[in-house]
Image (cartoon, grey):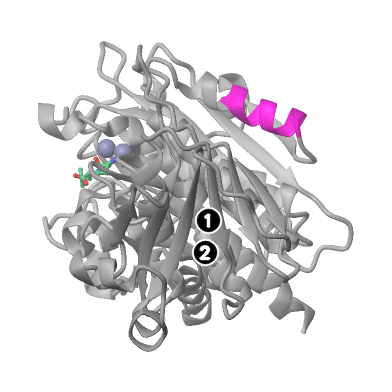
Amino acid sequence: MLFNISNKTIEQSAQTVKFVFVSIADYTNTTIEHKETLEANNFKALVDETLFLIESNILYVGIDNASYDNIRSSSAVAVRAINTKLYTNITIDMNENLNDIQIQSMCEGLILGNYQFLRYKSEPNISKIKSINIYTNKKINEIITKAKIVSDATNFTRDIINTPPDDCYPDTLVQIAQDLAANSTLECNVLDERKLEEQKMYALLAVARASRHKPSVIHLSHKPKNPKCVVTLVGKGLTYDSGGLSLKPATSMVSMKADKSGASAVMGIMKAASELNLPIEIHGFIGAVENMIGGDAYKPDDVLVAKNGKTIEVKNTDAEGRLVLADVLGYAQQEIKSDYIYDFATLTGACVVALGAYTIGIMGYSDKNKELLKVAAKDSGELVTELHFNRHLKKLLKSEIADLSNISSSSYGGAITAGLFLSEFINEENKEKWTHLDIAGPAFVDHIWGENPYGASGAGVRMMISLLTNLYQQESN
Ligand code: BES
Ligand code: ZN
Ligand code: ZN
């Protein structure tokens, strides 16, 4: 999608549709064209509300109070409303009162809303939109570039997650990471099975054992000169989670191709960080594994030794993400001394039960770091809620025969006990630096919501880019 910015009046043509964004305040207080028609059609300028005047080639788009979220969501709804039609261009007379973040939100909404995953359609109904012409006197090139980088990275993440498990297995994630590095400033290092053994990542290896696809750990890095700080990102990359021998019921297994959402988000964030030239050193670690059944499968009752030497009694092979992350977190901390550590994982169904399908659960020991995430979520239009650790829940991870069990002895509070399990694999000196993000809800949703399509949303990407941007501004002060 091409953005043309101009301060000359844009010619209308039959292939061009004009988007007119209307807030409730504009609608009430100013004289807008077609007001009578809009009123006659009960148009209220609410968020996600559109009215198409086909004879004038105009789409009116409600944005309610013009908040960033409303603008982003309505822009996505608007582009979807016309991307099945024959228009090839969109024109927008940019309201000169919009601030930079409102403009960025609008462009993000347009790109995110135009996302389609059509690889498996024999007769794809491809969006015809080729260009967006914006009429304005402001200098907005930089804002548009930023919006494009962030949204394209989100769509890149969505594509990886949506790809079915037979076409996206651990080696595919490795290939994607290597291609990403080959086409950018990123570096990529891959640990194959032999190196994982050398590194004593036996918990990860146990999860991977029954699959015909060999596991890998991927390390992507972004190393600018004189970085302001160092950030580690860790992603759960279960290219399929059948549950293992503790097999998932048929309906719960559907959509488990999305268990690689954390890994996919890490790749999207690394891509955007490199394109934006962020002055922060960033390391992305991915545990790429498939959790399957078979004669060689790891079993409930097994005791595994994680990389940090702790022993884990397996009571449920479907609680595999935490086993993989235990080792990848251990490896990441061994390799890189960083100021901030974030892990992204579709870790628990319990998080979806607790928060609903749209919200990321954040957990950790540092209030300051959780606050940074809340601010970033608000700026970028993602939803986060904090889940608090407590010592009573921690006791539920006790095992009679090993250092800890891979599941809690209670069926309540599963998102937090999973977070507490991970905390056992964070070195003492890093406890305050680490935050866990359970993205099981928003990573993959089976309907359209706001700027997000059916399926993968790219949860975590936009929020993290906001956070990293805020971080270097904060570190510079
Ligand atoms: N990948 C799942 C979590 C999940 C569930 C993600 C639903 C997205 C939607 C994870 O590996 C898992 O199976 N967790 C179990 C843990 C349980 C065995 C303690 C769960 O949530 O049921
Ligand atoms: Zn599982
Ligand atoms: Zn899983």
SS state under label 2? helix
| Residue 393 shown left or right of residue 421 in the figure | left
The reply to whether callout 1 and callout 2 are in contact (CB within 8 Å) is yes
- The quarter of the image that holds ligand 3 is top left
Residue 108, disc = 1
* Whether residue 14 can be seen here: yes
Q: Position of residue 114 (x, y in %)?
A: 45, 42
| Residue 118 shown left or right of residue 227 in the figure | left
Residue 105, disc = 2
* Mark 2 Cβ and ligand 1 under 8 Å apart: no
The answer to whether residue 316 is above or below residue 359 is above
SS state under label 1? helix
Q: Quadrant of the N terminus?
A: top right
Q: CA distance from mark 1 to mark 2?
A: 5 Å
Q: Position of residue 254 (x, y in %)?
A: 20, 30
Q: Which residues are magenta?
A: 174-183
Observer-nearest of 379 and 427:
379
Quadrant of the image occupied by residue 388? bottom left
Observer-nearest of 96 and 243:
96
Task: Check residue 180 for magenta coloring.
Answer: yes
Residue at 52 percent of width and 64 percent of height:
105
Q: Position of residue 107 (x, y in %)?
A: 55, 57
The answer to whether residue 32 is above or below residue 20 is below
| Residue 155 shown left or right of residue 77 in the figure | right
